[in-house]
Image (tube, rainbow, N blue to C red):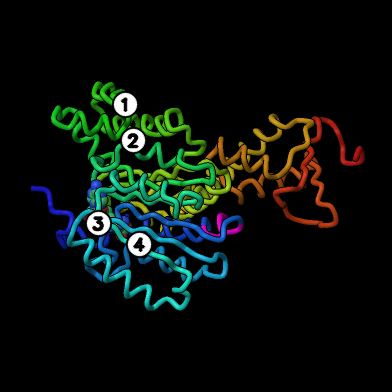
Amino acid sequence: MPLDDSDPDKWHMKEHTEVKHRILRKYLTTWTRIVSSGNPEIHYFDGFAGRARYEDGEPGSPLLALDVANRSADLFDIFHCTYNDYSDENYQILKEEVKDKKNSCENNTQIDEVIFNEEFEDIAIPVLDSEKYSGLPSMVFIDPFGYSGTPFNVISKIMNLQSSGNEVFFNFMVDTIRRFLDDESKEETITRAFGSSDWKSIRKYTDREKQEEEILKLYVSQLKEEAGVKYVFPFQMKHPDKNVTVYYLIHATNHFKGFKAMKDVMFNEGADDNFAYLGSDHYGYEDEQTNLFEVTASEDLRIKELRERLLSRYNGDTVSFNDILKFAYLNTDLIDTHCRKALTTLESQDKIHVDRGSSTRGFKEEYDITFRPQNQRLTDF
Ligand SMILES: C[S@@+](CC[C@H](N)C(=O)[O-])C[C@H]1O[C@@H](n2cnc3c(N)ncnc32)[C@H](O)[C@@H]1O
């Protein structure tokens, strides 16, 4: 018998939940900074809010968001929080925890919270499309236990409601879907979750990893092709003990700044540049000198590859540092720090010229970078 959603056994903090919460908190902090620069009011919507506190006392996502709002209050006028949970028991606990937390926030006059006790799919669009929230950028956290309450048409609509920029951070339950691939009684629900029946072709694979890979691939492609989302990025969560992917955290946004910020956060939370939590292996490499050496060597190699790709792509061109970041974030697993390292080496080898105006060092997004055509020298500038 599956456990009820309010069963205390479901509310013990697991290591991968800690990782999920760190990603959420760090990203929400950066997202708040980015979007509040153009919007005095912003909106966080926690559609599967849970009971806000775990059995061991750890805060859940609703309290983490309140904490971010409280700490960043100098950036905005109002931080709107919408919380929702369909379980009556979880909803009652959620209300109490949110009330206590808000009372303890010194900047609580800038926090406006509303709490619902509804099915996510019934409430998401009416709330996001309401007069109160439709003009605000909304970050929507979708964190179910399964896949039945998150139909694709709702996710797609959230991403297309307004041009001001909704984002979705979604706990996509790959393993639950995979285990039911051959269960005919689940067909309709899986089709609703994907917004397509193309998933049925995944049944032909018997290898678990291949099934996981194809499920993710189809979902990402649905978000990009059907929902028209520009940037979609997944983070893999493995089972603590078994070599199984429990879920993917999928971030969907139409803004490069948000995509970059999330990729930075996921890179730093991931094990060994994997954009993944690797279960029991996750922190292992930090203790092993040989592995640390391998990590550094593999990073050096990838930065070298990036240098070569940049040289051949931009040969003779002048582009901004921001253009280079876009290229790297969209086409490689590398991030900002790697781009800076690659460019620093290219500059020391006299293969690029960086126009820094009156500054002498570093890279800013607006700096122009000229890639010298192959045999041109520094004296030509
Ligand atoms: C994984 S827990 C949420 C944990 C919480 N986001 C956190 O990080 O602390 C999932 C919650 O979603 C609720 N839930 C499940 N299906 C739902 C649905 N269709 N609509 C609304 N809430 C739902 C459950 O009662 C449960 O509390």
* Label 3 packing within 10 angstroms: few (<14), some (14-19), many (20+): some
Q: Marks 4 and 1, how far apart in space?
A: 33 Å
Q: Sequence order check: which comes first, mark 2 or mark 3?
A: 3
Q: Marks 2 and 3, how far apart in space?
A: 21 Å
Of 112 and 139, which appears nearest the observer? 112
Say which residue label 1 marks: 196
**Secondary structure mostly taken by the magenta-highlighted segment of the chain:** helix
Residue kind at label 2, given as amino acid type: Phe
Side of 363 where 72 appears, left or right: left
What residue do we see at 12% from left, 48% from top?
Answer: 2
Say which residue label 2 marks: 152
Q: Sequence order check: which comes first, mark 2 or mark 4?
A: 4
* Label 1 packing within 10 angstroms: few (<14), some (14-19), many (20+): some
* Label 2 packing within 10 angstroms: few (<14), some (14-19), many (20+): many
Say which residue label 4 marks: 114
Residue kind at label 4, given as amino acid type: Val
Identify the mark at residue 117; answer none if there is no mark: 3
Q: Are marks 3 and 1 in contact (CB under 8 Å)?
A: no
